[in-house]
């Protein structure tokens, strides 16, 4: 098992490196847009418009400041002046890719094009806000789905309406759920129970730890509810369908024939087998934990990975974007690995077969 | 047992809900006297040499001072660090000397006076290699030297290349930084401004300049402005990225000693807090709840809705001013079908500016004949009339331009070229996908063009890709806004031949328009410039590379408890430092 895990981890690391390298090299093909966006906005009237030569000098200075004045890769195609055909030549280690890779090996993802800040610090700060938000939502959704699916599998009288409601919520985009919650529970015209934005009251007043925690939870209530509501139907409906399938199996009938109560059959016999597809669904939530939830972060004005990466993409802030790609890519591949491990644990037959 | 467990979990849930509700009630009380202002996005970088957006500019006005600053009330530049507007001395026909004197009250936080050497140092920073100064080095290149008065450390003269009116204002519109913090030994004094301006990019590294660049990078004023404290009225107390920026007024600011004190030197709020709320609907809810005090740049529909709501009217004041942002449609004159003025004039008659204003902006905005705001009585050419929405007239003009309607209606318009071959009139309209107003204009244009048989395809484009498409000429027609102000009328970056492939997206240029743009940029009196600007507007309407549709309104909603907002057409649209609570600030609880 340990040997299998080692090889899988090695493969995962190689896949993350290949993914990040691909994205790095592709992103540099769009570097002119990054340079353009770093220049003053063309839509603003300015005193000094500058001659083409001055603009070129300005662009070169920006390129040098952003570290884009060295060749992209170890080998490159150089087109000499007055020549039509380019020639391949070796650029040595003084290239953008080598510098980036060396930085990554040392845990440094470079500095942001926009702010000059270290990317590691920027990502770390965003994760600090994102993980509690997405983590608590994922946990709540998983626990609620587990509880609700077991109840639904027992075929109660309220099965139809609840299932209909779940399908209805499942059809709603996340931004609609977030807006509905905002307009219902943070609106002085309806119910102003929860705050409309932020993570705290952001005052200078000193609050004790308990008040700070209560304030934080109070601010997180609606965003977590929005994320939970969006994830809950998918998880519940899948698990409920899976449970219904398992309850129709011979071993479940046998268990019932032995006189076991319906709930006991579900919990002790059917649930473990029904969980397999849900494990893959739960593992899907792991990349979202670090990638954030841009819609909810924008709607509730929360800082986090989603907003950071969306804004970095819009501004072509490639160092930040690369850091995000590495992080979410690693989370995605690790989640796949984790799913496989959980499969082995839940159903040993899979391990024997593999 | 199960029932007991169920009851206990219900009780826990109830307690939690009650706690949250109590927390909610408690938080609705105002706890501090900070005035909370909404920003749609974080300034990201507060480096005074690298101001990338309006929020960064606004924040820097709190932390730093410039020689001159635009007065939002009078729409004139007024002195801040300078004692008065500079006196102007023309030297020959191409140079100008501007004589400045700094206020004797002006000091840094440590009590050291702000001197001419600080101004000289700041100007040299703009041209020092290794610093993020690409933009100021381009904008302030017209200042070729600074001459310090040996008899008075507060007096100096700026020698400018050119005698333009706007150079007088622009010469003082930069934040003055402390020499003592970055160059305590005064080593930069051995360099003249001209030395740095003409220093080739390939020059060997200089130890003094390198050391300065390292000290500047170490101070990181973009992220930690407190390490390079300016002489502005506020300190940045806390900056939580993407959440808020808190400013606290300095207890002893130098301008407190200035009598009489102009509005620009007011700093009334003890605390200012800019909160970052990207979504306008969320910001509106926060404003209605009292969690926000000022909501500038409010979307028109939300502004109109709240203004008619009795509950909102009871707690909020509403201000609408004409902005200097003009919505335009541009034609790519480098494309053969749009190279002639008649075709562009014809297509501009398919734009229903009044209809779009009514539909999208609820009639709030001003139609215009050109890129100058109708509010600017001196420079606006009121002898012209806005281009009418006239599809029938467009058909006549297309025929005059040599276009002929094909026999089949869906085949559109074609014209024979003198050198043989035919052209077909088919257009692609690009606009930023995130702007509803641009989408409305593009759809209206498409419908009107279709009614006269011109096929138009719409291409909503992501913001960064849109910038590149404009730069590369990858469009036929674009829709976008231009941000203007009442001070700068330099159209070189937009319409001059030397900006083709950069800011001049339309690719339009004629020798006449180039000469006119240069003359406007060089005009040394406002009257002379006004005459030229009126001619320029007439020429642009006749040539129609850009069709200015309307100037949008700017909307602000603010708490009724605030006074001294001074709503203005100039961004940010109000004077944050002159605001105050009507009944005096409440104390923290």
Image (cartoon, coloured by chain):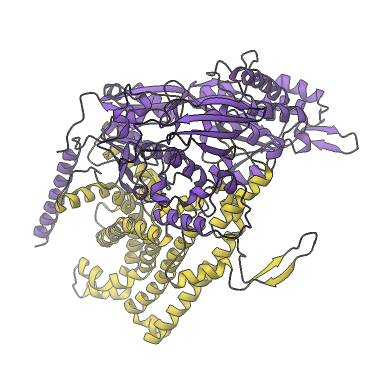
Quarter of the view holding residue B378 = top right
Residue A170 or residue B327, whichever sits in front: B327
Q: Is residue B326 above or below residue B206?
A: above
Residue A159 relative to residue B412: left or right = left
Residue found at x 59% / y 48%: B195
Color used for chain A? yellow
Is A236 on the left-hand or right-hand side of A213?
right
Observer-nearest residue: B297 or B102? B102
Residue B318 appears in the picture as rendered: yes
Depth order, front residue of A150/A126: A126
Compared with B375, B80 (above or below) is below
Place of residue A52 in the rendered image (x, y in percent of width and height, measured from the top left): 68, 44
Q: Quadrant of the C terminus of chain B?
A: top left
Residue that appears at 29% across and 28% down: B257
- Quadrant in the rendering for residue A74: bottom right
Q: Residue at x 36, y 56 (%)?
A: A126
Task: Report x, y in % for residue A98.
Answer: 55, 70
């Amino acid at each position: 098992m340990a040997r299998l895990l080692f090889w899988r981890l090695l493969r995962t690391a190689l896949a993350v490196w290949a993914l990040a390298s691909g994205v790095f090299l592709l992103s540099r093909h769009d570097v002119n847009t990054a340079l353009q966006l770093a220049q003053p906005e063309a839509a603003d009237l300015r005193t000094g418009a500058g001659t083409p030569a001055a603009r070129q000098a300005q662009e070169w200075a920006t390129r040098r400041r952003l570290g884009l004045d060295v060749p992209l890769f170890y080998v490159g195609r150089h087109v000499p002046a007055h020549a039509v055909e380019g020639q391949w030549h070796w650029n040595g280690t003084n290239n953008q890719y080598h510098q980036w890779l060396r930085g990554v090996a040392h845990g440094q993802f470079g500095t942001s094009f926009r702010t000059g800040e270290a990317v590691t610090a920027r990502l770390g700060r965003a994760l600090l806000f994102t993980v509690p938000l997405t983590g608590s939502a994922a946990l709540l959704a998983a626990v609620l789905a587990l509880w609700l699916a077991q109840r639904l599998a027992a075929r109660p009288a309220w099965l139809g309406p609840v299932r209909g409601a779940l399908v209805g919520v499942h059809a709603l985009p996340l931004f609609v759920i977030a807006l509905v919650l905002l307009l219902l529970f943070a609106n002085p015209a309806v119910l102003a129970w929860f705050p409309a934005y932020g993570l705290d009251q952001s005052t200078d007043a000193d609050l004790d730890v308990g008040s700070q925690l209560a304030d934080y939870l109070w601010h997180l209530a609606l965003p977590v509810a929005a994320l939970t509501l969006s994830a809950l139907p998918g998880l519940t409906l899948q698990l409920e369908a899976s449970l219904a399938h398992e309850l129709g199996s011979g071993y479940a009938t046998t268990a019932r024939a032995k006189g076991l109560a319906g709930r006991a059959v579900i919990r002790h016999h059917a649930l473990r087998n029904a969980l397999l597809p849900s494990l893959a669904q739960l593992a899907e939530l792991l990349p979202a934990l670090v990638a954030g939830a841009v819609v909810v972060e924008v709607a509730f004005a929360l800082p986090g990975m989603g907003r950071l990466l969306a804004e970095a993409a819009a501004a072509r802030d490639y160092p930040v974007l690369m850091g995000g790609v590495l992080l979410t890519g690693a989370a995605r591949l690790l989640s796949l690995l984790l799913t496989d491990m959980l499969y082995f644990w839940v159903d040993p037959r899979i391990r024997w077969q593999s | 047992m199960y029932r007991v467990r169920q009851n206990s979990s219900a009780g826990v849930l109830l307690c939690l809900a009650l706690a949250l509700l109590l927390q909610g009630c408690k938080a609705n009380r105002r706890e501090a006297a900070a005035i909370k202002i909404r920003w749609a996005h974080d300034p990201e970088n507060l480096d005074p040499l690298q101001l990338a957006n309006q929020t960064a500019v606004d924040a820097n006005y709190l932390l730093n001072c410039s020689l001159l600053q635009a007065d939002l009330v009078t729409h004139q530049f007024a002195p801040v660090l300078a004692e008065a507007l500079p006196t102007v001395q023309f030297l020959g026909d191409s140079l100008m000397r501007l004589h400045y004197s700094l206020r004797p009250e002006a000091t840094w936080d440590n009590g050291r006076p702000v001197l001419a050497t600080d101004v000289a140092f700041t100007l040299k920073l703009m041209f020092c290699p290794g610093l993020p100064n690409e933009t100021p080095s381009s904008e302030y290149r017209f200042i070729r030297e600074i001459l310090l008065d040996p008899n008075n450390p507060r007096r100096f003269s700026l020698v400018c290349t050119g005698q333009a009116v706007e150079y007088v204002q622009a010469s003082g519109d930069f934040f003055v930084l402390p020499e003592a913090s970055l160059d305590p030994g005064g080593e930069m004094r051995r360099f003249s401004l001209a030395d740095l301006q003409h220093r080739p990019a390939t020059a060997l590294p200089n130890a003094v300049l390198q050391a300065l660049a390292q000290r500047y990078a170490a101070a990181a004023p973009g992220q930690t402005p407190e390490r390079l404290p300016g002489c502005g009225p506020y300190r940045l107390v806390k900056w939580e990225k993407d959440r808020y920026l808190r400013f606290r007024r300095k207890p002893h600011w130098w301008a407190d000693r200035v009598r009489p004190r102009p509005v620009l030197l007011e700093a009334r709020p003890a605390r200012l807090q800019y909160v970052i709320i990207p979504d306008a609907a969320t910001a509106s809810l926060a404003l209605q709840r009292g969690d926000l005090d000022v909501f500038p740049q409010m979307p028109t529909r939300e502004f109109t809705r709240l203004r008619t709501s009795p509950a909102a009217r009871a707690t909020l004041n509403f201000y609408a001013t004409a902005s200097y942002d003009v919505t335009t449609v541009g034609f790519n004159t480098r494309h053969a079908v749009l190279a002639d003025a008649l075709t562009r004039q014809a297509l501009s008659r398919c734009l229903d500016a009044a209809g779009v204003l009514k539909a999208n902006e609820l009639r709030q905005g001003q139609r215009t004949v050109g890129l100058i705001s109708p509010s600017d009585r001196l420079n606006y050419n009121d002898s012209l009339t806005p281009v009418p929405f006239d599809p029938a007239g467009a058909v006549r003009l297309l025929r005059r331009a040599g276009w002929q309607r094909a026999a089949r209606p869906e085949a559109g318009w074609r014209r024979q070229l003198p050198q043989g071959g035919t052209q077909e009139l088919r257009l692609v309209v690009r606009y930023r996908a995130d702007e509803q107003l641009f989408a409305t204009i593009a759809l209206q244009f498409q419908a009107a063009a279709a009614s006269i048989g011109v096929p138009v395809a719409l291409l909503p484009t992501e913001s960064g890709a849109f910038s590149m498409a404009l730069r590369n000429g990858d469009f036929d027609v674009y829709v976008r806004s231009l941000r203007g102000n009442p001070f700068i009328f330099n159209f070189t970056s937009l319409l001059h031949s030397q900006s083709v492939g950069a800011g001049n997206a339309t690719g339009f240029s004629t020798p006449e328009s180039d000469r006119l743009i240069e003359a406007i940029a060089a005009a040394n009196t406002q009257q002379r410039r006004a005459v030229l600007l009126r001619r320029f507007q007439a020429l642009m309407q006749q040539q129609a590379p850009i069709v200015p549709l309307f100037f949008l309104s700017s909307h602000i909603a603010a708490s009724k408890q605030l006074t001294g907002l001074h709503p203005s057409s100039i961004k940010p649209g109000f004077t944050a430092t002159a605001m105050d609570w009507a009944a005096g600030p409440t104390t923290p609880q």
